[in-house]
Image: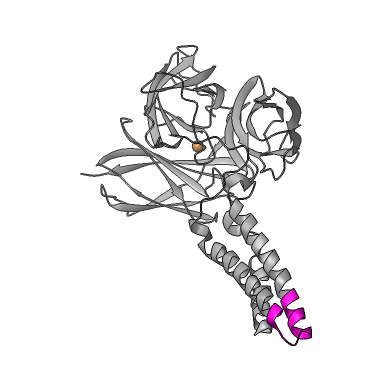
């Protein structure tokens, strides 16, 4: 009997390997797409396991990606550390404490300020109980076994074993109940209000350009200012959504110009990106973002580019978008609100970009509608999207994927008959 208990105890100790179930989100890297110095790249702030300790920053980019100057500031005490990062050349910064930090990223005269929190999993009280219980039970079982072996009368062995069994029962119960027990929040986490804030007001936006009326062929800044629909204060609580604080799609009214970029946070509630347009006219902007505790939102805007059209070939040399390939739509004559399949044959080996193998963005002719779906499978030589057009009409569509050479955009149009 004692031997059996001992075996069960040993098994439990072995099986209760360190708390995979206590996976508080502190263990995750922070990945953030940024369009900076004419390059599209993903900044990765690696998860930290101890503080004070190293904080590693990496860049996933394309051959053209520039080196970035980094400046990490602790909001609590203002301490600053600096470094440089480039693709394949990570930066080793140092975090002295958990909690609020700001990472300032600069390249090519552009600067983004990225607020984030250094979080370290501090484990929960439950974990302490499990391991404490198992440790005591293990000790007592060994003791019980030995006492049982050498003590003929066996009473003290019985007592010891009973205590061990009780310890094991507590530990095992906690392991079993673990998914339902409250998790300890990681060290450095934002204090959460106890009352529900599940519906913060919608974000309002103002889309402007600097200068106000950019000229064809000239670089300008597209600026999105976000403010709270209720208080009018800047909205600075965006969560990272598909690996970006915000996704900005800019298209010309005729659908021939298309950019999908990731603006820089230059001030609280302010996002900016540098662009260049190759034809005069009205440009439509769409911002996809997600406010903390509030779900996703699509914000629209517009600006005008003036001057004579320029045929410069590549419309925006700053953003290296290769435009090639073709998309196949099945059925060839789609019907509104019926599922169609869009297949794109890729050139080069796609790699995940913004957390997905491929992106499909669809706009209707007058710009009232913008849709965005993903290829959910693993990157392969063929990307498949399923999509439903809302109404009959003409649609502009762009499939996008990334390879080691850069981001490829495959533009096509679809006619949905009445
Ligand atoms: Cu995006």
Residue at horizontal 55 percent and vertical 54 percent from the top: 379
Colour mapping? one colour
Residue at horizontal 57 percent and vertical 36 percent from the top: 33
269 or 193, nearer to the observer: 193
Is 153 included in the stretch rendered in magenta?
yes
402 or 374, nearer to the observer: 374
- Residue 413 in percent (x, y) is at 37, 40
**Magenta stretch, overall SS:** helix
Which residue in the rendered view is the most extreme toward the bottom? 152
Q: Quadrant of the C terminus?
A: top left
- Residue 18 in percent (x, y) is at 66, 60
Residue at horizontal 61 percent and vertical 58 percent from the top: 20
Toward which corner of the image does residue 148 lie, by quadrant?
bottom right
- Residue 218 in percent (x, y) is at 54, 16
23 or 322, nearer to the observer: 23
Note whether residue 41 is visible.
Answer: no
- Residue 54 in percent (x, y) is at 75, 39
How many numbered dots are placed on residues in this image?
0
Which residue in the rendered view is the most extreme toward the right? 150
Q: Quadrant of the N terminus?
A: bottom right
Query: Residue 149 vs residue 243: left or right?
Result: right
Is 35 included in the stretch rendered in magenta?
no
Span colored in magenta:
143-157
Note whether residue 397 is visible.
Answer: yes
Residue 94 vertical position relative to residue 339 in the rendered view, above or below: above
């Amino acid at each position: 009997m004692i031997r059996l208990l001992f075996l069960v105890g040993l098994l439990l100790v072995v099986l209760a390997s360190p708390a995979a179930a206590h996976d508080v989100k502190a263990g995750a890297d922070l990945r953030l797409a940024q369009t900076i110095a004419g390059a599209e790249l993903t900044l990765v702030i690696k998860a930290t396991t101890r503080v004070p300790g190293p904080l590693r920053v990496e860049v996933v980019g394309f051959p053209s990606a520039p080196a970035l100057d980094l400046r990490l500031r602790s909001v609590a005490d203002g301490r600053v550390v600096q470094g440089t990062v480039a693709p394949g050349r990570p930066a080793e910064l140092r975090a002295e404490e958990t909690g609020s930090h700001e990472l300032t990223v600069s390249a090519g005269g552009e600067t983004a300020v990225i607020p984030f929190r250094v979080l370290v999993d501090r484990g929960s009280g439950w974990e302490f109980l499990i391991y404490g219980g198992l440790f005591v039970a293990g000790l007592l079982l060994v003791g019980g076994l030995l006492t049982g072996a050498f003590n003929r009368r066996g009473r003290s062995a019985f007592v010891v074993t009973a205590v061990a069994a009780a310890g094991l029962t507590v530990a095992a119960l906690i392991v079993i109940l673990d998914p339902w027990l409250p998790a300890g929040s990681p060290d450095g986490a934002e204090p959460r209000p106890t009352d529900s804030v599940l519906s913060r007001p919608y974000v309002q936006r103002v889309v402007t350009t600097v200068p106000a009326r950019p000229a064809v062929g000239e670089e300008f800044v597209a600026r999105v200012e976000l403010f709270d629909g209720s208080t009018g204060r800047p909205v600075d609580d965006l969560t990272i959504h598909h690996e970006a604080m915000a996704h900005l799609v800019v298209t010309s009214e005729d659908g021939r110009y298309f950019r999908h970029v990731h603006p820089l946070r230059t001030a609280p509630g302010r996002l900016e990106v540098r662009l260049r347009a190759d034809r005069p006219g009205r440009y439509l902007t769409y911002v996809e973002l997600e406010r903390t505790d509030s779900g996703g939102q699509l914000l629209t805007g517009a600006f005008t580019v003036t001057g004579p059209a320029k045929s410069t070939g590549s419309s925006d040399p700053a953003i290296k978008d290769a435009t090639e390939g073709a998309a196949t739509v099945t059925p060839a004559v789609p019907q509104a609100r019926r599922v169609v399949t869009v297949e794109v044959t890729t050139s080069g080996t796609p790699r995940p970009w913004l957390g997905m193998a491929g992106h499909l963005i669809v706009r209707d002719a007058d710009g009232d509608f913008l849709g965005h779906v993903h290829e959910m499978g693993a990157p392969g030589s063929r990307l498949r999207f399923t999509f439903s057009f809302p109404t009959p009409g003409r649609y502009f569509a762009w499939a996008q994927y990334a390879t080691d050479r850069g981001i490829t955009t495959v533009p096509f149009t679809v006619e949905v008959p009445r």
